[in-house]
Image (cartoon, helix red, strand yellow):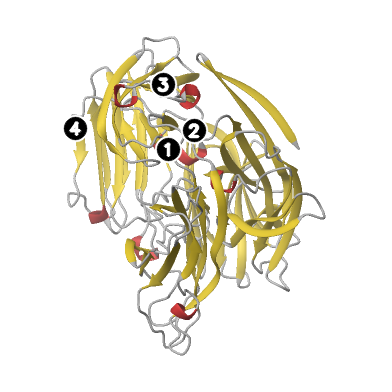
Amino acid sequence: MVLLMFFSAGLYAVDTLHVVTHSKTTVVTNPTDGFNYYKSWGRFPSANVPVRQIIMKVRLGCPDGMRCADWDYKDHITIRRTGGKNGKSQDFEIGRMLTPYGGAFPKDWSFNWQVDVTDFSMLLRDSVEIEYNHTGWEPNKDRGWSVTIDFEIIKGTPALEPVSIHKIYDGAYRYGDKDNGIENGLKPVSFIGNEKADFARIRVVQTGHGMDRPDNCAEFCSKYREIYFDERMISKRYIWKHCGDNPLSPQAGTWVYDRANWCPGNLMNPDIYDVKVSGAKKHTVDINMQNYISSDPSADEYITAYVIQYKKPRARYDVRAEDIINPSLKDLHRRQNPSGFSPTVVIRNMGSETLRSLAIKYGTRGFKNKTYNWKGSLHSFQTDTISLPGLIDSRKGTNLFDVELSKPNGKTDQYAADNKVVSPFNSVPVHSQTMIVYLLTNNEPSQNSYRIVSSEGKVVQERKLGSLKANTLYKDTVQLSKGTYRFEVIDTAGNGLEFWANPKGGRGKLFLLNKEGAIIKDFESDFGSSLYYDFQTGSPADPVRAIKSYAVYPTRTEDKVTFDYYANFEKDVLVKIITDPGDRVVEEHSYKSIKEGVFAYDLSRLPKGRFYLKVYIDGKEEYTKRIRLKE
């Protein structure tokens, strides 16, 4: 499927093609083999069409008639064939998706990820077969994923012209086996510099999997990796990723646990290293892992790496507006939005000269633009994330925020078509100047703190780390001046006020209330590392909405669970406890015209297994939580 869009960016125009190879494809496991292939052809631009950038967008949702799948499996998106059905076999992994724990997602859930795949532009031409390989062994009759893969192809003069692409590593490399060390697989790989090439790009995707002894490698151990080019080390870093700030939260499983370079619900971004090459000269790339021996080796480092050789960059002075983090409606930026001040933009230097200065014009459409003169030192193809000063102007509802770059190093940008980026966003809520911070701490309050910060950076209210007591209700009344504020909550352990796998931590809860005691914001207790909530104060305040707060705890139990409900208005509430799988109702509880209540259910009579607690308001399912009983 090919769609053509025309986007006007100020005085410039950008042609954008969308090649959708998988459109809401229902993806399930093959429990017999542990992998299931979903192949589809896409019609990409021909080789003579200039391509500026290719962004692969991946959307997961719950399939029609099924629920979202449970496990954090490793899925591969691969080029299988190019040039038509009788064309060349390629087998190039261009994306790696780590699926989320979807067991508690509602039926209408979906999430969007994206990754830049411009480095594969030589291959994404004409007819290309794209494969989505879903791994795993969970049941496949009632659960799965709806997968959409959309290649956003921006036409235009390329900043870089590739001359060759070579695969140098591709496989699962056993780690920790004293009889077969990982370096037996990760041997140095040589290639010959192309006479037309100015530099080579080493593109690496690596994730660790398996749980051995003694370190739970490779998924849950932090080990370092070294990369050598021509026997010179160009990178040394730990293969590790913090997950408590995952934009996709909460999830049903251990989503907050840090892992070996990935998190559940994660489309991998590659590690990129640009190195100079000489024509007709042999060059060598060598990837090494930290020495490690396991008493029970089962760990694997999954590594794909490519060398793409490029001609000299087309322009000396060329900068691209890469993204707007806030304000934004993107799923990937949920934690930073909606936002009321300090807009944040990502820029990339696309030119051959080090970028040292830049003019940035920004603002909300319908309001006066602001300007900011950036200074720094940004080498070719590197990015910088810039926090811009000032408020984010808005009208109630959806707005458009523009960022436009100019004058790189005081020069005329040699490719202005990608200097501008536009971000739709929602305005922040408006509350009255008196509010109440309602915080019930858990058993581990030393991990928690909160503060309210004004747009000028002044802390107007806070509870510092170490100041909170366990299992204590704090109701802090705050009087604020008219303005814009950010409410920040930190958990230093990365497991929020509640996490099912940390029962000793207990459960806390957090609201913002108006002075009459109505909820104006209900925060999820299972929030991981942090919460950020921007708002304005003034008149008129937003009307009190029909906010409802739900909680079920503990979700792993031997007998009892508690359902905690709080709402701003009286409603009829129906609670059902349902088997998983099978959807058989084992308990049902009806409550008429209630605003709040704490209800305990004894499930000890039920057999070991998994259940769902579902809440229906006025006949509509509004909340689902999975319970693990006697497991």
Q: Amino acid at mark 2?
A: Ile
Which of 398 and 423 lies nearest the eye of the viewer?
Answer: 423
Which of 459 and 440 lies nearest the eye of the viewer?
Answer: 459
Quarter of image, res 347: top left
Of callouts 1 and 4, the N-terminal one: 4
Q: Residue furthest right?
A: 86
In the rendered image, the vertical position of residue 256 relative to residue 408, given as above or below: below
Of callouts 3 and 4, the N-terminal one: 3
In the rendered image, the vertical position of residue 497 relative to residue 476, given as above or below: below
- The label shown at residue 459 is 4
Specify whether residue 585 is in view: no
Q: Give the distance between the C-alpha atoms of the residues marked 3 and 4, in whole angstroms.
A: 32 Å
Of callouts 2 and 1, the N-terminal one: 1
At 35% across and 79% down in the image, what residue appears? 291
Q: Amino acid at mark 4?
A: Val
Contact (Cβ within 8 Å) of mark 2 with mark 1: yes
Q: Give the distance between the C-alpha atoms of the residues marked 2 and 1, in whole angstroms.
A: 8 Å
- The label shown at residue 522 is 1
Q: Position of residue 55 (x, y in %)?
A: 57, 40
Of callouts 1 and 3, the N-terminal one: 3
Quarter of image, res 488: top left
User: In this rendering, would 239 be left or right of 457?
Assistant: right
Q: Amino acid at mark 3?
A: Glu
- The label shown at residue 547 is 2
Residue picked out by circle 3: 404
Find numbered disc 1 in the image and state the secondary structure of the residue it sits on.
strand
Find numbered disc 4 in the image and state the secondary structure of the residue it sits on.
strand
At 42% across and 76% down in the image, what residue appears? 216
At 57% across and 34% down in the image, what residue appears? 571
Contact (Cβ within 8 Å) of mark 3 with mark 4: no
Contact (Cβ within 8 Å) of mark 3 with mark 2: no
